[in-house]
Amino acid sequence: MAYDLHLADRIRSILDGAVAFSEKKMFGGLTFMVNDHMCCGVLKNDLVLRLTPEDAAAALRRPHTRPMDFSGKPMKAMIYVSPPGTDSDEELAGWVEAAVKIARATHRSSDIS
């Protein structure tokens, strides 16, 4: 198993009906795309989020988060949230909604990376 299927289903239920999205296998896991931009995903048991660099820096001050360093170099706008940070549906929804907001804004502006 390359990614947590239950976490992927929970993310689908948050996105379903709220926003048009697609799914792609990426990073050895599953990525959810909004407006053809990466929004969030699942890699092993972790939630992966694409935020603004500023939002990612703030999120990294929260428990159960760490920089995404998939390539060995931390990515400024990408973070991992470990399973304890997504235990409750409310926590997971908050994370996913923050990433959706960025993906939607990316569609309107090229300033967000």
Image (cartoon, rainbow, N blue to C red):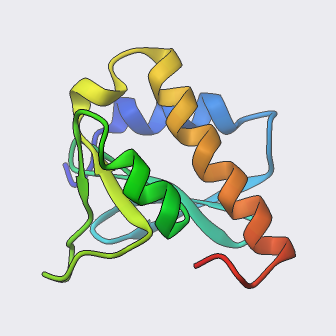
User: Is 49 drawn above or below residue 97 in the view shown?
Assistant: below
Tell me if 92 is positioned left or right of 87 in this view.
right
Which quarter of the rendered picture does the C terminus lie within?
bottom right
Q: Residue furthest right?
A: 108
Horizontal and vertical percent position of residue 59 = 40, 46
Tell me if 85 is positioned left or right of 108 in this view.
left
Disc tally is 0
Horizontal and vertical percent position of residue 97 = 64, 39
Residue shown at the point (31%, 37%) measured from the top left? 62
Residue shown at the point (44%, 39%) measured from the top left? 8
State which quadrant residue 72 falls in. bottom left
Residue shown at the point (27%, 67%) measured from the top left? 28
State which quadrant residue 18 falls in. top right
Tell me if 90 is positioned left or right of 41 in this view.
right
Q: Nearer the viewer, residue 24 or 48?
A: 48
Horizontal and vertical percent position of residue 104 = 78, 60
Q: Nearer the viewer, residue 53 or 43?
A: 53
Residue shown at the point (61%, 44%) measured from the top left? 98
Horizontal and vertical percent position of residue 51 = 53, 60
